Amino acid sequence: MRELFSLNGKRVWVAGHRGMVGQAIVRRLAEEGCSEILTVSRAELDLRDRAAVKAWLAKHRPDVVFDAAARVGGILANDTYPADFLFDNLEIETAIIRGAFEEGVERLIFLGSSCIYPKFAEQPLREDSLLTGPLEPTNEWYAIAKIAGIKMCQALNRQYGARYISVMPTNLYGPGDNFDLQSSHVIPALMRKAHEAKAANADHMVIWGSGTPKREFMHVDDCAAGIVHAAKYYDAFEHLNIGIGEDVTIREIAELVMETVGFGGRLELDTSKPDGTPRKLMDASRLMALGWRPQISLRDGLKSTYEWFVEHHAAVA
Ligand code: GFB
């Protein structure tokens, strides 16, 4: 397949390089022959500050930007802090996408999430189901901000002929994830709960909701490989799904995590917590048609993520 954009010899800024996805993109880009991979710490640059971001871009002059910077979190964090999720993400996107364009960045890859799709959209979720129905209420604030980011890129492409693309990963997990029980996504939460239940010789662990929602889980290194692939081979107006095309129920993932951790107790449901959207399985056929395939099975990915968690437990828990 012919490369539409080469990363070889390019100066690349990974915005959000401390997050799980940003870290994985930095690891993946090490294999791409970029001339330099730029990162900047939160202490040095507030990514919500449009003037500061523009000045930083003017000084460091990247050719390419991977925009993996966002305020992210699991279902409870999204539901509890709607204003932070909406404003922070809109500010970050505006500063980075508009700043990049004004400072002559040739190529930008904007990252979103599968929660941009309507709650009851037909499954698997095709790219063209965007904006065809109401969103899932627990995360509509984040979703609206991410939809705005897609539209910012499309508007620049339409009005000025930019080549800015948007990629929408499914639910992710892996090394570098957030393991805080209040703000994390489901896999790191369950891993920590199973680990602590095992250590305490408990007879059960609690999962939120009914256990029946379905989610598609992709290892972050597969995601980063898919995103870098898209940067090189995808140039269409519409955003691109990044997924694997398979999902499991929350009960099934809980059982797999318990098996990975070696905890044999019971599962108890806390139905005071929300289920969120019933299902969000990505149609990843466009990405697959570009010649990309996932490499990491859920079982292997959980195993290596748990090893990472155990090694870094003191630091992250
Ligand atoms: O991963 P998660 O927080 O995010 O939750 P979403 C997925 C499902 O797992 C929900 C259930 O049905 C939860 O109720 N669950 C069970 C748990 N036990 C737990 C637990 O201990 N912790 C957590 N966190 N969940 C988020 C969105 O949605 O996912 C974001 O809010 C974004 O906007 C992100 O799209 C990928 O898949 O529901």
Image: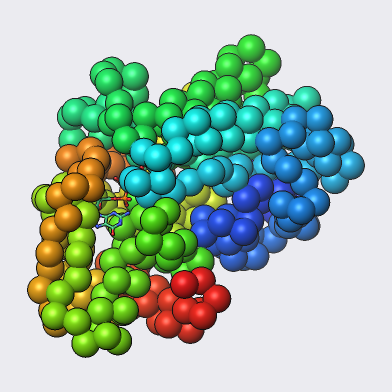
Q: Which residue is rendered at x = 36% and y = 38% of the image?
A: 79
Query: Going by the image, does 217 lie left or right of 68?
Result: left
Q: Which residue is rendered at x = 77% and y = 46% of the image?
A: 45
Q: Nearer the viewer, residue 193 or 165?
A: 193
Q: Nearer the viewer, residue 170 or 283?
A: 170
Query: Going by the image, does 97 lie left or right of 235?
Result: right
Q: Which residue is rendered at x = 51% and y = 71% of the image?
A: 316
Q: Which residue is rendered at x = 33% and y = 64% of the image?
A: 189
Which quadrant of the view contains residue 201?
A: bottom left
* Percent of width and height locating residue 77: 41, 46
Which color scheme did the rendering employ for the protein?
rainbow
Q: Is residue 261 above or below residue 138?
A: below
Q: Is residue 261 above or below residue 17?
A: below
Which quadrant of the view contains residue 304?
A: bottom left
Which quadrant of the view contains residue 78?
A: top left
Residue lying farthest right?
A: 59
Query: Going by the image, does 67 lie left or right of 213?
Result: right
Residue 202 shows in this picture: yes
* Percent of width and height locating residue 299: 26, 72
Residue 170 shows in this picture: no
* Percent of width and height locating residue 231: 56, 44
* Percent of width and height locating residue 237: 49, 24
Q: Nearer the viewer, residue 51 or 246?
A: 51
